[in-house]
Image (cartoon, helix red, strand yellow):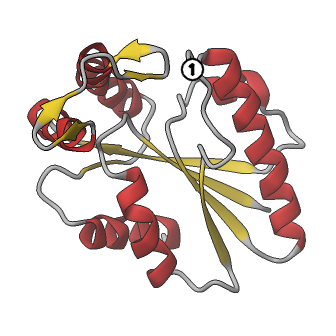
Amino acid sequence: MTKIYFISGVCGVGKSSLMPSLRALLPTEKYTVLDFDSRGVPDGADHSWRQSESRYWLEEGTRTSADGKELIVCGFVKPADFNEITDESTPVVRIIVLDADGETIRKRLIGRYTKDGMFDETQKVIGKPINEFIESNVWYSTKMREESLADGLPVIDTSSFTPEQVASKVVDLINN
């Protein structure tokens, strides 16, 4: 049965940083690693957009499986969303959640969204002011961690690991 892996977590946990290392560790003849956001993210991206993109990636995983490959998609998905969009004809979905402590997430996002150490206070990310975007990710990380653990999903804390070390942990989960 075809499997599609979603590597999820809030912004700043290391999903995008992980992709080159995953590609290096996994055989390209068996796995395809892609970015959930590669088709673009609209301002105000919401539940409906996320579900639409998740459906797209499920279909892409089915196409990829025809080539004998498994698809790994790195990007923010909510595990509960899959209850609404999957059925018995859908490939098996495996979700691996990346996590980090609040200060690590905040530090990474501040580094991503500053220039010369300064915020552009007018900058918006998915329709939110930058500070609100950062704090909402810090807040939601705790909730996502709790929900994921309650659902029995594997959670990898990336706070003190390099992308290469995190990729190795992900590969171990995929192989087991």
Q: Is residue 88 above or below residue 119?
A: below
Q: Is residue 84 left or right of residue 154?
A: right
Q: Is residue 139 left or right of residue 85?
A: left
Residue 56: name its quadrant: top right
Return the x and y of residue 115 as percentages of the image width and height: 20, 41
Return the x and y of residue 76 as percentages of the image width and height: 49, 36
Of the pair 117 and 69, the residue shown nearer to us: 117
Question: At x 30% / y 21%, what residue is drawn?
Answer: 130
Question: At x 67% / y 30%, what residue is drawn?
Answer: 82
Q: Is residue 134 above or below residue 132?
A: below
Of the pair 168 and 138, the residue shown nearer to us: 138
Of the pair 148 and 160, the residue shown nearer to us: 160
**Residue flagged by tag 1: what amino acid is it?**
Asp
Quarter of the image with the N terminus is bottom right
Pointer 1 local density, CA inside 10 Å: few below 14, some 14–19, many at least 20: few
Return the x and y of residue 39 as percentages of the image width and height: 69, 44
Question: At x 40% / y 38%, what residue is drawn?
Answer: 9
Return the x and y of residue 57 as percentages of the image width and height: 74, 46
Look at mark 1 in the image and give the residue it sits on: 43
Q: Is residue 161 left or right of residue 79?
A: left
For label 1, the SS is loop
Of the pair 8 and 171, the residue shown nearer to us: 8
Question: At x 49% / y 22%, what residue is drawn?
Answer: 126
Q: Is residue 85 left or right of residue 67?
A: left
